């Protein structure tokens, strides 16, 4: 088989090493607080990964478990604590619009997950910096950012093209349009120049920046296309279907495609996909955690800048 299986551990290694060196050489210890207010097995596993990785890189991590009805007050306490540099919440908590509300309760200066409305607005509008001087990059949600880094690592991004256009000519299908991962990822990739087919149970939308990337930010078009129409066109197929039974129909995937799974379940049939894909990434969790820590160090530095400016 010519398929190369690429593991998240190898992709995340350079980021983790850089974080370790930064924290050690600067003699800093950024503090991250994670709130767990549910019994979701995926959230519990993510919390365990976070704690383990933070211990290895030198980040101080504190997991605070609480009842979901107490969560808002606990977040506000952490917002006001100068000793806390970053805050994350393991979702879903309520599983509805109240979760979106909680994302905005987290102070924008401590939001390591990039879920605050300010970051979300900037991401969808292709605004990449928080300040006019362009000294502070926006915080990007960890899993979408991790998937971008995976695609950079395996060569989907074209480094010869200008920054911001490096996916020009790429066709990407994402089977997931959740507000946490699938839809923001589609926007990020389209803003970088790709034509993105975003698939969910209601149909397929196309995210794009127009012919020749004439648009400054992506647009979304409704389509009548089906999975069997878009998979054969796709250079990259990304899946995040939260179901143990869902499998991507391997026979529809074009020879030599890049296939990436971010679901906790295996959405690709491992044996079949290795006969079609050139590159297969079965999971991205460790890259996601590395991006979380990277965002934390970035926010730590922004907080130092703000304190120095107000001194």
Image (cartoon, grey):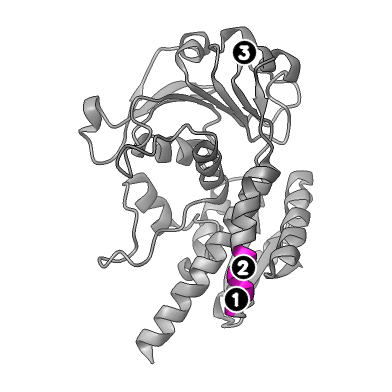
In this view, the residue in front, 61 or 40, is 61
Secondary structure of the residue carrying tag 3 is helix
Quadrant containing the N terminus is: top right
Q: Residue at x 61, y 79 (%)?
A: 28
Q: Are marks 3 and 2 in contact (CB under 8 Å)?
A: no
Vertically, is 163 above or below 186? below
Quadrant assignment, res 204? top left
- The residue pinned by badge 1 equals 25
Q: Residue at 78% x, 49% y: name it.
A: 45
Instruction: Name the residue tied to disc 3.
Output: 276
Q: Between tags 1 and 3, which lies in front?
A: 1
Few, some or many residues within 10 Å of mark 2 (<14, 14–19, 20+): some
The residue labelled by disc 2 is 21
Question: Circle 1 sits in a helix, a strand or a loop, which is it?
Answer: helix
Q: Is residue 137 above or below residue 287?
A: below
Q: Nearer the viewer, mark 3 or mark 2?
A: 2
Gap in angstroms between the C-alphas marked 3 and 2 = 39 Å
Give residue 21's position: percent from left, percent from top: 62, 68
Q: Position of residue 139 (x, y in %)?
A: 46, 58
Task: Please indicate whether residue 297 sits to the left or right of residue 249 in the image.
Answer: left
- Find residue 173 and name its label: none
Residue 91 makes an appearance in the image? no
Instruction: Kindly identify the residue that appears in the image at 65 percent across and 20 percent down.
Output: 3
Q: Residues within 10 Å of mark 1 (few under 14, many from 20)?
A: few
At x 44%, y 73%, the residue is 302
Quarter the C terminus occupies: bottom left
The quadrant holding residue 78 is bottom right
The answer to whether marks 1 and 2 mark residues whose Cβ atoms lie closer than 8 Å is: yes
Q: Position of residue 93 (x, y in %)?
A: 67, 52
CA gap, disc 1 and disc 3: 45 Å
Q: Which residues are magenta?
A: 19-26
């Amino acid at each position: 088989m010519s398929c190369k299986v690429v593991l998240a551990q190898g992709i995340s290694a350079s980021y983790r090493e850089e974080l370790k060196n930064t924290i050690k050489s600067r003699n800093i210890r950024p503090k991250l607080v994670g709130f767990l207010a549910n019994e979701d097995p995926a959230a519990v596993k993510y919390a365990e990964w976070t704690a383990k990785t933070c211990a290895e890189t030198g980040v101080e991590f504190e997991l605070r478990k609480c009842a979901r009805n107490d969560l808002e007050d606990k977040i506000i306490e952490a917002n006001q604590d100068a000793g806390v540099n970053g805050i994350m919440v393991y979702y879903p908590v309520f599983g509805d619009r109240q979760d979106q509300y909680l994302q905005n309760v987290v102070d924008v200066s401590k939001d390591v997950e990039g879920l605050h409305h300010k970051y979300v607005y900037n991401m969808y509008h292709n605004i990449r910096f928080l300040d006019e001087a362009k000294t502070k990059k926006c915080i990007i949600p960890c899993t979408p950012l991790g998937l971008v880094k995976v695609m950079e690592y395996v060569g989907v991004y074209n480094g010869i093209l200008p920054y911001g256009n490096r996916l020009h000519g790429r066709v990407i299908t994402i089977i997931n349009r959740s507000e946490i991962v699938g839809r923001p990822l589609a926007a990020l990739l389209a803003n970088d120049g790709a034509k993105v087919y975003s698939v969910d149970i209601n149909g397929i939308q196309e995210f794009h920046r127009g012919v020749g990337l004439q648009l400054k930010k992506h647009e979304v078009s409704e389509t009548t296309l089906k999975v069997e129409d878009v998979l054969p066109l796709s250079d990259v197929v990304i899946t995040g279907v939260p179901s143990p039974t869902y499998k991507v129909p391997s026979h529809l995937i074009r020879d030599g495609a890049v296939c990436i799974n971010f679901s906790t379940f295996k959405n690709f049939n491992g044996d079949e996909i290795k006969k079609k894909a050139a590159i297969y990434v079965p999971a991205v969790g460790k890259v996601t955690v590395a991006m979380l820590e990277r965002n934390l160090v970035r926010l730590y530095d922004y907080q130092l800048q703000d304190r120095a400016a107000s001194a």
